[in-house]
Amino acid sequence: MAEDNKPAENIPMPSKVSEVESYMKKYAGLGESFDLGVRKLTVLKKEVHIYYVNGLTDAAYVIEILESLVDSNHWEKSYQKAVDVIKNRIVHQSVVEIDRLEKLRDEVLSGLIVIAVDGYDKGFVVDVRSYPGRQPEEPDTEKIIRGARDGYVENIIVNTAITRRRIRDGRLRFEIMRIGERSKTDVAIGYIKGIADPDLIDIVRKELKNIKVDGITMSDKTVEEFIVHQGYNPYPLVRYTERADVASMHLLEGHVLIYVDTSPSVIITPAPLFHHMQHAEEYRQSPAVGTMIRWVRFLAIAASLFLLPIWLLFCLDPSLLPDQLDFIGPNKRTHIPIIIQIFIADIGIEFLRMAAIHTPTPLSTAMGLIAAVLIGQIAIDVGVFVPEVILYASVAAIGTYVTPSLELGVANKIARFALLILVAIFKVPGLVIGITLYILLLTGIKALNTPYLWPLLPFQPKALSYILFRRPIPGSYERPSIVHPMDKYRQPRKG
């Protein structure tokens, strides 16, 4: 029974508008869904149907088109050329003809209007979309002190326009397709022809076309899982950004971007590990300041991963500490083992993070006071935690939040838990084994056939220097070799 209402594919557009109306009633819900409608007109003795969805179209444009068509009855007398007159009277810059009924249905449900003329076996698609949504604004997760304050929104048309405003190159391409048998979500591949690797473009295009699912209402995340086949590997294989300047910079480097309608995040491919550690703020400051910010960020990321396991090792085996550093261990003792305290504190911080996301803004200050005073201090006073556990767990949490990529921060937290367990069981051998397995895991990961630890493995000293130091833009002649750009140089060499 579920297949009874599934329309057949490749049905030619009938020349009778009554048959078009019957199709829309059967397979689109015309007459049942209040927001789907049809406006019937008579233009030059031809019956004309205009199909639309309320809420997805700009009413002002639709009314202007209707007025132009109706005025044709007063000024035109060539009834034999009614179709040509109607086509010329559609006052809009984007008019496309279609010859399939399923195409008509999909376009209407996507927010465009379709004009069907009796006696003509094609329909006119007019792009008058006006999706509900917010205006471009600075993303909360990628704030900077100086720089542009616009960012991507949930409208794919706006997002591609913001990108094209920054790259006015005739070779910038946006290939659009629809994914999802039921959702019909617009997905676009963005790249610069002549820079991006054609093989990478083909891989991304092929993976997108192979997505067979009823819908991708979770938009970019669903697309990511289909194209990179990540499984239970916690480390991100693509990078997300909501900043148009960051996305544009990656396009100029030779990356391929994926825009998904209804999502303000753009997917950047490929994305090795060190790409997830860079932030736009580094490029809004001088090279020296940007390098300092980058090193501080690297230190914070390392602290989020290794600080707690190393401190736990010193707690379990104080003989490893020199006399000058014997203060590092806990000065107080409780009945709860240190490893349990660390896990309680770490998971408790995760509780607070989740609560902060779900707490309404007027209550967030009160929740912060409860977390800091009641939970933290009282837990120490009653002997649940030693103060050092709260200190080092907080530093590790701050390092997690300093990580520009949320996905990388969470993956590092999972790796930290694994290291803590190994240290608690095996002490020094556990730390050595854990770090070795960690490096081997990252070495074996490939993001769309790209080594995850590039440029460290395989080792490329020049590329690694670009990772460690924020180089001045005038001296950055080459694009990253990891994307295999067709045009290797971004600016001519001096001399």
Image (spheres, rainbow, N blue to C red):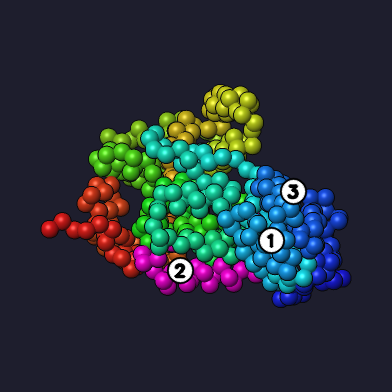
Height in image: 387 above or below 251?
A: above
Q: Which residue is the site of mark 2?
A: 201
Q: Which residue is the site of mark 3?
A: 54
Question: Residue 5, percent across and down?
Answer: 83, 68
Q: Is residue 202 visible?
A: yes
The residue positioned 42% from the left and 39% from the top of the image is 148
Neighbourhood count class around disc 2 (C-alpha, 10 Å): few under 14, some 14–19, many 20 upward? some
Verify CB contact (< 8 Å) between mark 2 and mark 3: no
The secondary element bearing badge 1 is classed as helix
* Front residue of this view, candidates 213 and 109: 109
Q: Which residue is the site of mark 1?
A: 86
The secondary element bearing badge 3 is classed as loop
Quote the CA–CA distance across marks 3 and 1: 23 Å
Residue 28 found in image quarter: bottom right
Quote the CA–CA distance across marks 2 and 3: 36 Å
* Front residue of this view, candidates 84 and 479: 84
The residue sitting at the left extreme is 495
* Front residue of this view, candidates 74 and 471: 74
Height in image: 82 above or below 70?
A: below
Q: State the mark number for residue 104.
A: none
Quote the CA–CA distance across marks 2 and 1: 40 Å
Labels 2 and 1: the sequence-earlier one: 1
State the extent of the magenta-drawn residues as a range: 191-217
Q: Amino acid at mark 1?
A: Ile
Residue 307 is covered by the magenta coloring? no
Residue 209 is covered by the magenta coloring? yes
Quadrant where the image shows the N terminus: bottom right
